[in-house]
Amino acid sequence: MNRALALTQIGMPLSLINTEPKMPKSGEVLIRHSAIGVNFIDIYHRNGLYPLPLPHVLGVEASGTIEAVGENVHDLKPGDRVAYAGAPVGAYADIHLLPANRALKLPDIVDESSAAAMLLKGLTAHMLLTRTFPVLRGTIILVHAAAGGLGSILTHWAKQMGATVIGTVSTDTKAALAVANGADHIIVGRDADWASDIRNYLGGQLVDVAYDGIGGTSLLRTFDCVRPFGMVASIGQAGGQIAPISVDEIGPRRSLSLSRPSVMAYAADLPSYRGGAAALFAAMEGGWRSPIGTEFPLEQANIALSALEIGATTGSVLLLP
């Protein structure tokens, strides 16, 4: 039997179900999971922000070992260690059928827990740092929730690229984690005056690009942190739904660019997916790992989602089958 956590009603806890495993069809592989990544998009799916047909098993990221391959699969075989991220949604399970072109072979040095903790967030960071706003040596960036799973990866990767990283966090404990991960300057407190703090730190300047996954009322405050002709990337709404924003808030006074990039769209494009993953795995082969904050048994997926939603986690959160 295959255990899975399925959403049966919008906004309600996931239900543990048992299904009969299916064998892969042509072009598919069957993966037995070793570790499953927990992400904010799973919360958005559960709450109906990004609707799924119901019932539906949640989860967009995992790693494991191939158990079987269908016809016309030539570059993968049973026993290969792989990871995947993006669609099709359904990773909260012991096993998962997947199109073979979504399965990424893991380098020998990359363990499966690290792959599940980093792949989707690493793809997001790659998209933000190379496609949304190309970060160069000397670029100054603002990362909200800098001690979280994505924030940790963004901070580390941007520092490797020569950027100056300013981060925001909610507690002193999280500030210490962000500094340990390479942040140059940390602003503590959800109600802090980010723009004034940034000007004080930068001698009157503002940042070149800001990454806002908080949403709620934070987006307008983030606009005030970015220099004219800089960019704000709105990448989530962990702090609540984003209110409608007038185009006049972007310019001409602020003269900003606003981006709303989707890692699911990025991952759906196979060249971007495989190129971003290759860059991430190369960095991981050099010894870089994002911290894994908490691991939960698969059947405790509801507890894991609640902890992530209320900000009670640091680093990446995993489910273990």
Image (cartoon, rainbow, N blue to C red):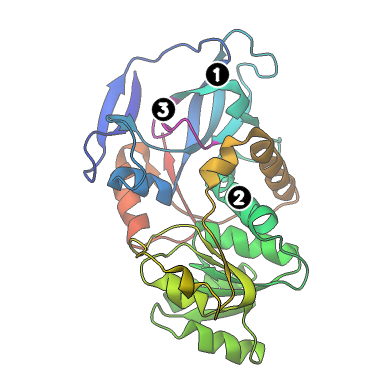
Residue drawn at 34 percent across, 50 percent down: 305
- Helix, strand or loop at disc 1? strand
Mark closer to the chain start, 3 or 2? 3
Front disc: 3 or 1: 1
Mark closer to the chain start, 2 or 1? 1
The reply, left or right, for residue 54 in relation to residue 252 is: left
Point out residue 173 in the picture as x, y percentages from the top left corner.
46, 74
Residue where numbered disc 3 is placed: 94
> Pointer 3 and pointer 2: residues touching (CB < 8 Å)?
no
Point out residue 226 in the picture as x, y percentages from the top left corner.
58, 77
- Quadrant of image for the N terminus: top left
Q: CA distance from mark 3 to mark 2?
A: 23 Å
Residue drawn at 37 percent across, 72 percent down: 217
- Quadrant of image for the C terminus: top left
Residue where numbered disc 1 is placed: 29
Query: How crowded is the residue under tag 3: few (<14 C-alpha within 10 Å), some, or many (20+)?
Result: many
Residue where numbered disc 2 is placed: 122
User: What is the magenta range?
Assistant: 85-95
- Can residue 27 be found in the magenta stretch? no
Residue projecting furthest to the right: 137
Residue drawn at 52 percent across, 89 percent down: 196
Inspect this view and state whether residue 173 appears.
Answer: no
